[in-house]
Image (cartoon, rainbow, N blue to C red):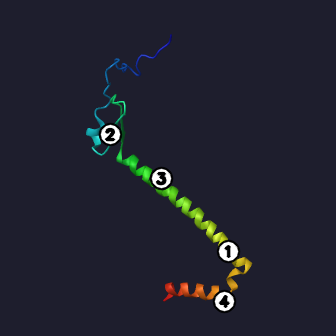
Amino acid sequence: MVGIEGLSGVPDPQQGQIAKVRGDRRADTGKQDVRETAAGEGDRVAISSEAKAAVEVMRILQTTREATEARLEKVAAARERIANGEYKNPDVVRKVAERLMKYLA
């Protein structure tokens, strides 16, 4: 059977031992969440503040894209109503003028 015995001269950790790689990350940044697995085996996941910020930026971008798409649908619907003449009603014209005056006065 073929096997790999370590990478680049670094030996594999012995069974039952935890290999320490580049020191403790919590000591390096101090701004990471560390969570142990439910099994309590000592596995941990560390999420840096930079990763958290990247996720927040991605969430904001997604929300912006969704809002833009919804806005484009509303604009298209309004243009269609204008083309169909729905806004030529005197009551609609008066109501639009009243709303515009809020921004012009």
Q: CA distance from mark 1 to mark 4?
A: 18 Å
Badge 4 crowding class, 10 Å Cα cut-off, few under 14, some 14 to 19, many 20 or more, is few
**Vertical placement of 98 versus 16: above or below?**
below
Q: Secondary structure at mark 4?
A: helix
Q: Earlier in the sequence, mark 4 or mark 2?
A: 2
Q: Earlier in the sequence, mark 3 or mark 1?
A: 3
Q: Position of residue 28 (x, y in %)?
A: 28, 40
Is disc 4 in contact with disc 2, using a CB cutoff of under 8 Å? no
Q: Which mark is residue 34?
A: 2
Q: Report how far apart the C-alphas of labels 4 and 2 lie in the structure.
A: 64 Å
* First reached walking from the N terminus: tag 3 or tag 4: 3
Residue drawn at point x = 72 percent, y = 81 percent: 85
State yes or no: discs 3 and 1 in contact (Cβ < 8 Å).
no
Distance from Cα at disc 3 to Cα at disc 1: 31 Å
Count every numbered label the image shows and give the total: 4
Q: To which residue does mark 4 refer?
A: 90
The mark lying in front, picked from 3 and 4, is 4
Q: Which is more toward the observer, 92 or 16?
A: 92
Q: Position of residue 36 (x, y in %)?
A: 34, 35
| Residue 79: numbered disc | 1
Percent across and percent down for residue 19 are 32, 25
- Residue located beneath label 3 in the image: 58
Q: Earlier in the sequence, mark 2 or mark 1?
A: 2
Q: Quadrant of residue 72?
A: bottom right
Q: CA distance from mark 3 to mark 4?
A: 45 Å
Q: Secondary structure at mark 1?
A: helix
The alpha-carbon separation of the residues under discs 3 and 2 comes to 22 Å
